[in-house]
Amino acid sequence: MSTFTHSDGPGDGPLRAEAWRLWHNYVHSGRDVSYEDYFAGFVESVDTEAVRELVLGCWGSSWEDSAEEPIDLLTQAADRFPNLRLIALGDIPSDEAEISWIRQGDLTPLLGAFPRLEVLEVRGGEGLGLRPLAHDSLRALRVESGGLDGAVVRAVGGSDLPALEHLELWLGVSDYGGDATVADLAEILSGERLPALRHLGLQDSGIQDEVAAAVASAPVVARLESLALSMGTLSDAGAEALLTGQPLGHLRTLDLRHHYVSPSMAERLAGALPRTAVLLGEARKPYDFDPDGRYVAVSE
């Protein structure tokens, strides 16, 4: 199946809409139409100057083809999309491809080609790359992964992102390439290059207690409005670190959902932060067959 769909009805001449979703799957369409030809057809059929949001779903075979080609093609065509403000790369549901199957690429040229981009959302960590850069317009960066390379985390921290308000990283587990350590988070947690940051999500981590302990003394937290340490293996140890660290009462929201915190500790958290919406939900039950037993929300 090869489609590009939009939110508005077409008129005369080139199709005009602000938001488009691209989907090209070899399984249904065969390999007679390359992604390059498919993308060229999209560019020629659409009033690209009107496009503000572009969602890239499947770009061939979900588990064989990387995002390098769509990244390269979009980068080369950057001048055709002067008003593009949002790119979602890898918007592929799990029934089509598990998150660990999605092969990504280097995001650096994409951000360089679109200096006015405001939102970048990425799904999948295999082959994902990023080098430290400066970008004056990016307001939101969201990376969903079952295992995020520490080099990508360090590159985010090493980038100058003065407009970034929302940062969300799913760190994942080592079985799926998630080798990021607390040390890799150092520059993010310092906040020196993130003066506008208001939401920080360091989520889905197999070392969530260690992350919580680092966050508890991180300078960036003082300027945040919301903090998410959800989806991971947070236990009483991590919760205790949050309680004994710097004050968190200024937060509007503290998201800890999918956790392994005891009922008594959950009560302490809520009591210590009466003006903060502490999102906990029900504690997870560890796997019986695992010595540790805790697991993250998203890995494969």
Image (cartoon, helix red, strand yellow):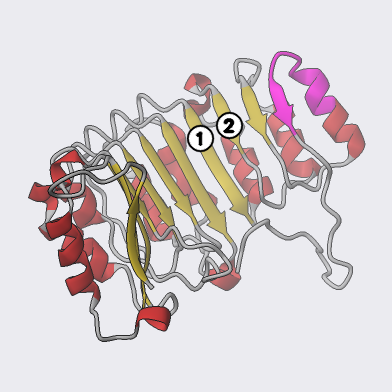
Identity, as a three-letter code, of the amino acid under mark 1:
Leu
In this image, 11 relative to 274: left or right?
left
Say which quarter of the image contains residue 103: bottom left
Q: Position of residue 125 (x, y in %)?
A: 45, 64
Viewer-nearest residue: 95 or 110: 95
Q: Position of residue 185 (x, y in %)?
A: 47, 46
292 relative to 115, above or below: below
Viewer-nearest residue: 207 or 252: 252
Q: Position of residue 265 (x, y in %)?
A: 85, 34
Using the rendered image of the protein, determine whether residue 159 is visible from the camera's viewpoint: no
Magenta stretch bounds: 268-279
Q: Earlier in the sequence, mark 2 or mark 1?
A: 1
Residue at coordinates 48% horizontally, 42% vertically from top-left? Answer: 168
262 relative to 243, above or below: below
Q: Quadrant of the N terminus?
A: bottom left
Residue at coordinates 77% horizontally, 43% vertically from top-left? Answer: 237
Reading the image, the residue beneath label 1 is: 200
Element on which disc 2 rests: strand
Reading the image, the residue beneath label 2 is: 227
Identity, as a three-letter code, of the amino acid under mark 2:
Leu
106 relative to 116, above or below: below
In this image, 86 relative to 221: left or right?
left
Q: Position of residue 251 (x, y in %)?
A: 60, 20
Whether pointer 2 and pointer 1 mark residues with C-beta atoms closer than 8 Å, the reply is yes
How far apart are labels 2 and 1 at the CA level? Answer: 5 Å
Element on which disc 1 rests: strand
Q: Total number of numbered labels?
A: 2
Residue at coordinates 19% horizontally, 39% vertically from top-left? Answer: 50
Q: Quadrant of the C terminus?
A: bottom right
Say which quarter of the image contains residue 40: bottom left
